[in-house]
Amino acid sequence: MAKFNRKVSRDRRHTRIRRRVQGTETRPRLSVFRSLTNVYAQVIDDTKGLTLAAASSLDAEIKSAADGKKKAEVSKLVGALVAKRAKEKGVTMVAFDRGGFRYHGRVKALAEAVREQGLKF
């Protein structure tokens, strides 16, 4: 029997999600990736293959504000920044792609921050 592999399980869940979640011009996909130390978010138009807006915990704006904060609090900052950048590009609605991660903790904090900024999904 094969050994349990967390990454393979996440990839399998992500593939299942991506069958249904498709980013269009009117409703691009908000993709979230969470590594052990950082959080990344992108707003993607899958029909054209373009990234409309992106933010991560490595951005200079967030890195300076994130000093001494918990990972979930940093995720809120990333969510607010990606929402602000998406709204500047005229995006009002997105399809949320949690990337195979549970809607919990950092992913949930990012999603709620995006909603607070006025993006709908």
Image: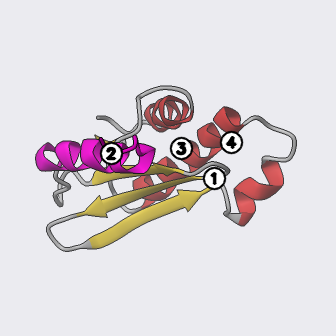
Query: Would you name the residue on which mark 4 appears?
Result: 74
Q: Give the main secondary structure, helix, strand or loop, of the magenta stretch.
A: helix
Amino acid type for the residue under numbered disc 2: Ala
Quadrant into which the N terminus falls: top left
Circle 3: element type: helix
Picture layout, residue 37 above or below residue 73: below
- Display colour scheme: secondary structure
Amino acid type for the residue under numbered disc 3: Gly
Tag of residue 79: 3
Amino acid type for the residue under numbered disc 4: Val
* Label located before the other in sequence (4 or 3): 4
Please say whether residue 5 is one of the residues in the magenta stretch: yes
* Label located before the other in sequence (3 or 2): 2
Query: Would you name the residue on which mark 1 appears?
Result: 38
User: Which is closer to the viewer, label 4 or label 3?
Assistant: 4
Please say whether residue 99 is visible from this viewpoint: no
* Label located before the other in sequence (4 or 2): 2
